Amino acid sequence: MAEIEIRLPKMGESVTEATITNWLKNIGDSVSIDEPLVEVATDKVDNELPSEAAGTLVKILFEKDQVAKVGDIIALLSTDGSTVTREFVPESKKEETVAPVKTKAVVELKASSSTEAISKNGSNGKFFSPLVRSIAQKENVSKSELDSIQGSGQEGRVTKNDLISYLANRVNSAQRVEVISDNKLPLAPKVDSPQIVGGGFLSNIKEPIVVPNPGDEIIEMDRMRKLIADHMVMSVHVSPHVTSYVEADVTKIVNWRNKVKKKFLEREGENITFTPILIEAIVKAIKDFPMVNVSVSGNNIIKRKDINIGMATALPSGNLIVPVIKNADRMNLTGLTKAVNELANNARNNKLKPEDIQGGTYTVTNVGSFGNVMGTPIINQPQVAILALGAIRKVPAVIETLEGDFIGIRHKMFLSHSYDHRVVDGALGGQFVRRVADYLEDFDLEREF
């Protein structure tokens, strides 16, 4: 019998795994080449994967809601319709033989005696692999302890190494207390809280349990909202946020756009909005201040070569997604306009590809589209800065001329720049957003496109 293995393909930069959301074919169904076979979810994008071959679907290796890694065999096809009888274990499901971690200590800080079964999803929505759950039960780690561990895997998932490090830390903590006791020093009072993991105090933080009142409606978060929630909480805990504000006079830009938008539409077939004009100014400022276009990895700063601008986009569902304009510094205003429009339309119509949301180095969010004048955006990790664009408003302003000052009507907007104070100090963060405003205010009214 000829048998064909269907593997999970690579679906973009840094995408290492995907969740199976729906099988479009059942066992015994015929499958044609390039016919949609399975729906998967990676990060925030849902995709249909076409079959790489023709045949009869005879075995499914991953059920709905299970996570497969890139390269895993997810299904088997038969070219003659025969039934597969052999059992196959996917690589990512093969449980490794792990020696039990010794956790014996003279003074036990908080060892759980619970043997409760641990479900594959924690209370905060994080997925626990069978291997992690197996180790946790063998080492008497409670479900609440497992929830408290800061994972290093995809979407903050707890890996085997995270769990082993946690267990080792629990041993070391107990041993430190034992040494203090041997030296006849007083013990610190026992605190009924989760263990401190590594250098992080975050494991002590627990979200409150909220009891609904009569008549309240309970709405379960969808998958995307859970991802957004985890990502935002992680970002706030990882980066000390600081926000600087600048008000920019964009009267020249408003007047120029009003003058050219009809001609631009006729020539390019695209509507020119303010967004690409603002992104162009941001790209210029990044070139002047490249240290806002960095990422932090431990004690190292990674200075990005490319300028890839993410633009936060609201979806009809109310969720948020951040498609990325790659190499924005290599595009003219027409190219930026087309890239902005295409990504925004694909986002709203659920047509983004995994690579469309990968590789961003700096993010822009347009809070002005909702009538907001300013905001305090949360950094999109692993970036170190994000700029919120406020609404453009007509306001009275003092206009300085050689003949004297007078009051006039101007179009103005606030720029809110949030940055990671670990690597971006107030001088750099403030100078950067001021430079963006300078580029906007110095816009050439006679510019050709």
Image (cartoon, rainbow, N blue to C red):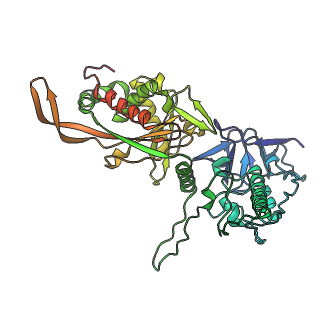
Residue 267 visible within the image: yes
What is the quadrant of the C terminus in the image? top left
Residue in front for this viewpoint, 389 or 205:
205
Residue at 29% over, 20% down? 447
What is the quadrant of the N terminus in the image? top right
Q: Position of residue 262 (x, y in %)?
A: 28, 29
- Figure disc tally: 0
Q: Is residue 240 left or right of residue 26?
A: left
Residue at 66% over, 64% down? 194
Residue at 45% over, 78% down? 215
Residue 121 visible within the image: no
Q: Position of residue 393 (x, y in %)?
A: 24, 42
Q: Position of residue 58 (x, y in %)?
A: 81, 51
Q: Position of residue 401 (x, y in %)?
A: 14, 26
Which quadrant of the view contains residue 118?
Answer: bottom right
Residue in front for this viewpoint, 118 or 5:
118
Q: Is residue 83 left or right of residue 70?
A: right
